[in-house]
Amino acid sequence: RAKSQGRNTYCFYQEEMSREVMARLTLENALRLALAREEWVLHFQPQVHLATRRLTGVEALVRWQHPEQGLILPGRFIPIAEEMAIIGDLGAWVLRAACRQMQEWDALGCAVPRVAVNLSVQELERAALVPLVQEVLRETGLAPERLELEVTESMIMCEAGRAIETLRALQQLGVSVAVDDFGTGYSSLRYIKNLPLNRLKVDHAFVQDVGRSHDDDAIVRAIIGLGHSLDLEVVAEGVEREEQREFLQREGCEVGQGYLFGRPVPAEQIVARPLADGAR
Ligand code: C2E
Ligand code: MG
Ligand code: MG
Ligand code: MG
C-alpha cells in the first residue's frame, strides 16, 4: 500500500512538473514572439515635487500587451526575459520608446521634464549600453539631462568594475542615474559615496507605514539624511496617502511617486493633465 501510494505521489509530481515545464516553455516561446512583434506598451507614472505637486518627471514602466491574456505586468516576464538573455533587446525597445514619447509630448506642447527608464543588470554589464544611449539621444534629439536611468543597489554592488565605468560614461553624456528600491539591497555606505549617482529612490516598503510607525519614520528619516549628505535628490516611492506626503515633505524629501499622485497610465493620459492645466 505504501508502495503504491509512493508511486502515485511520484506520478503526481511528475505530472505537476511537466505541466510547469510546459507552461514555462509556452511562456518563453510567447516572449520570443512578443519580442519579434513588439507586443510591448509603456505606461508612465508621474513623479511630483512633494511641496507643490508639480510634475518633475515620469517613470516608464513596460507592460506586455498579450494577444489573449491582455496586459501583463513586468513582474511576470522581466525575470524570465533576463534568464533568457533577451532583456537587452527589450531594454533597447523601452529606451527608444521612452525617448520617442518625450519627443511626442514636446511636439504636443506638453513638456514632461524628464523620463526615467529602468535597467536590468545585463544591460548595465553590456558594453553596448553607452553607444545605444548615445544613438537614441541623437535619434530623438532629447537633451541628455531629461533622461534618467534607474539601477538597483545590487546591480552596482556586485558588478563593481564594469557597472561603475558604465555609470560614469553615462553621467559624462549628461544622463542622470538613480538608485531604485534603495534600502532593500545591500550597500556599503563608503562605496556608494564614490558612485556617480544623482538621485536615490526610497523603496516603497519603507514608505508604506511612515506617519504611523515610529520605526519606519526613523528609517526613512535616516535614508533621506543619507541621500542629502551624499548630495543626492531623494524620491519616495509608493506614496499612497496624504499623511505619508506630509511626513516626507516635512523631512525634506524632494520628490514623490505613488498612487496618491497618479498610477502608471498610457502616454495620452499624462498629456491630458498638464495641457488641461496650462490651457486654463
Ligand atoms: P520599480 O522600478 O520599483 O517600479 C515601481 C513599481 O511600483 C511599479 O510596478 C509601480 O506600478 C508600482 N507602484 C507605483 N506606485 C505605487 C503605489 O503607490 N503603491 C504600490 N503598492 N505600488 C506602486 P510595476 O509597473 O509592476 O513594475 C515593477 C517592476 O518591474 C519595476 O519596479 C521595475 O523594477 C521593473 N520594470 C518595469 N519596467 C521595466 C523595464 O522597462 N525594464 C526593466 N529592466 N525593468 C522594468
Ligand atoms: Mg524603477
Ligand atoms: Mg522602485
Ligand atoms: Mg520595485
Image: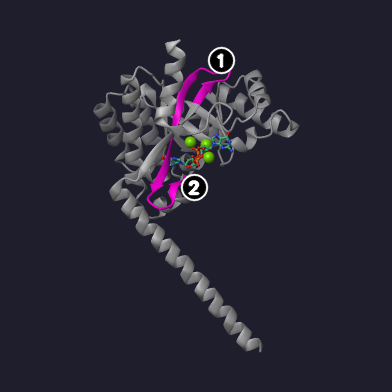
The disc labelled 1 sits on which kind of residue? Thr
Q: Number of callouts in the render?
A: 2
Identity of the residue drawn at 66% across and 18% down: 250
> Given the image, on which type of amino acid does mark 2 rest?
Gly
Residue 155 is a magenta residue: no
- Percent across and percent down for residue 51 are 58, 16
Tell whether label 1 touches label 2 (CB within 8 Å): no
Picture coordinates of residue 47 (x, y %)? 50, 25
What whole-number distance in Å separates the C-alpha atoms at marks 2 and 1? 32 Å
Q: Give the residue displayed 68% in from the left and 25% down from the top.
A: 243
Give the color scheme: rainbow, by chain, secondary structure or one colour.
one colour
Q: Which mark is residue 2?
A: none
Q: Residues within 10 Å of mark 2 (few under 14, many from 20)?
A: few
**Residue at the spot x=62%, y=24% of the render?**
225
Residue 95 horizontal/vertical position (percent): 34, 35
State the SS at label 1: loop
